[in-house]
Image: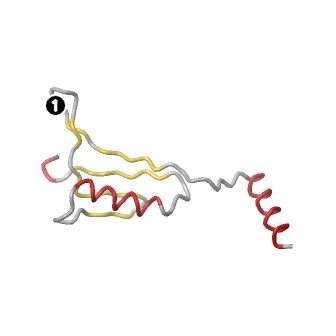
Amino acid sequence: MRSDLSRRLKRLEQNVGVVAEAQPLIIVRFVKPNQHGGEPCQSDRAECHGQAWHRKLEETPQDFESRVTSTLQKRKLSPTILIFFPGNGGE
């Protein structure tokens, strides 16, 4: 009985367009121009869906980005746009 309900629910979800697969995480990083085309600005703040993250003093830019993206990848309910804002001075 349980498997029958599960199968019927899955079929209903497919008919109405419910997507069970992971949705994309779109990351926006700012780039400052230079003679080689540009280089990424180091971020000290990120925002997504009204939530904000701040880089800790001892945290590298790569660790900060990993921490924020791993938090968001647990949700995957809808396409997500994550913006990493440049730090003070755009560095």
The residue at 21%/62% (across/down) is: 59
Local SS, label 1: loop
> What crowding class fits label 1: few (fewer than 14 Cα within 10 Å), some (14-19), or many (20 or more)?
few
When the figure is inspected, residue 39 is found, relative to residue 50, above or below; the finding is above
Residue 63, given in percent of the width and then of the height, sits at 27, 58
Q: Which residue is mark 1?
A: 34
**87 or 65: nearer the viewer:** 65
The residue at 23%/54% (across/down) is: 61
Residue 16 located left or right of residue 64: right
Residue 25, given in percent of the width and then of the height, sits at 46, 50
Residue 18 located left or right of residue 54: right
Residue 53, given in percent of the width and then of the height, sits at 31, 63
Q: How is the image coloured?
A: secondary structure
Residue 11 located left or right of residue 43: right
What count of labels does the image hold?
Answer: 1
Residue 19 located left or right of residue 33: right
**19 or 59: nearer the viewer:** 59
- The quadrant of the image that shows the N terminus is bottom right
Residue 51, given in percent of the width and then of the height, sits at 38, 64
When the figure is inspected, residue 69 is found, relative to residue 41, above or below; the finding is below
- Check the image and name the residue furthest to the left: 89
When the figure is inspected, residue 49 is found, relative to residue 33, above or below; the finding is below
**65 or 51: nearer the viewer:** 65
The residue at 22%/33% (across/down) is: 38
Amino acid type, mark 1: Asn
